[in-house]
Amino acid sequence: MTHLYVFFFYTYLGDDMKLYLDLIFIINLFFDFILLSGVAVMLRRNIAFKRLLLGSLIGALSIFILFYSFSSLELFFVKFFISFVMTLVTFGYKDIIYMIKNLVYLYVTSILLGGFLYFLNIQFSYKNEGFIFYHHGMSINFYVLLILSPIIIYIYIKQIRELRNNYANYYEVDIYFKDGKIKKLSGFLDTGNLLYDPYQKRPIILVDNREINFNYDDNVLLVPYDSLNYHGLLKCIIPEKIDIVGVGERFNVLIGISNKKIKMDGINCILHNGLMEENNV
């Protein structure tokens, strides 16, 4: 990805302005390998090391476009073509969606890393007085940036995976009560929620008691429960049905009123794993 090695060209050489092709080639190879490896990890692509290296080598050879005169539009298409070939060689071709996803993630990762490194260089290289910025002749060390780059990609991938794992279990839930009222909640699928009605084996979802603020005396029952540290009676409401967006409607279910605050980001409903089964309708 050419914008990264051009950035390092100016960062490392500064005012010397001597062109070290071997150095630029190695830098570009390093960054292309980091970027392609990051995409492979994020998208869980099982790619052989030699394919990653070959794709990186193709990207690194793009330094030779610096010796040709291109218009801005031509340069854009040349860079895009090189990126396309890099992803094609590294990940292969299965279908157009597979190819586009690989290419998009390569660009997103490249923009993230390039932008972060540019930010670090600006912080070390410029001073400001009010809204006026000027260069004070100091750039962040070249080797420090090389060390930081894999760390930045690692942190980015870690955060992406955590978001995927957490928000993959988030669902919009509509509860339809027998009096015609509808309650819209944000639910989290908790595989540890194993609460069932012992009489009719109905799965129980837990709802924060602050979300249930009207009278359901005609449709309330007490369900005994026994967990590792707690046991007692759980107040439950019999709804008309619940609708889990993206999953479907469920009728054979109880709403358990939780007196404990649900300590999850934006969540006010804990779903039962049994509700994901199609036969539970």
Image (spheres, rainbow, N blue to C red):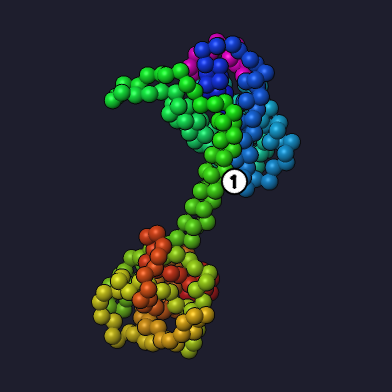
Q: Position of residue 115 (x, y in %)?
A: 47, 31
Q: Residues within 10 Å of mark 1 (few under 14, many from 20)?
A: few
Q: Give the residue at x 57% y 43%.
A: 154
The one nearer the camera, 256 or 6, is 6
Span shown in magenta: 63-75
Q: Position of residue 46 (x, y in %)?
A: 68, 46
* Left or right, residue 58 beside residue 257: right
Q: Is residue 252 above or below residue 9?
A: below
The one nearer the camera, 88 or 54, is 54
* Left or right, residue 32 beside residue 183: right
Tell me which secondary structure the magenta stretch mostly adopts.
helix
Say if the magenta span includes residue 61: no
Q: Position of residue 140 (x, y in %)?
A: 51, 26
Which residue is label 1 attached to? Answer: 43
User: Label 1's element?
Assistant: loop
Q: Give the residue at x 68% y 27%.
A: 57
Residue 218 visible, this orientation: yes
> Residue flagged by tag 1: what amino acid is it?
Leu
Residue 84 visible, this orientation: no
Q: Give the residue at x 37% y 19%.
A: 134
Image quadrant for the N terminus? top right
In which image quadrant can residue 22 be found?
top right
Q: Is residue 208 above or below residue 230?
A: above
Say if the magenta span includes residue 68: yes
* Left or right, residue 58 beside residue 42: right
Q: Give the residue at x 46% y 18%.
A: 137
The one nearer the camera, 247 or 141, is 141
In which image quadrant can residue 27 be found?
top right
Furthest residue toward bottom: 199
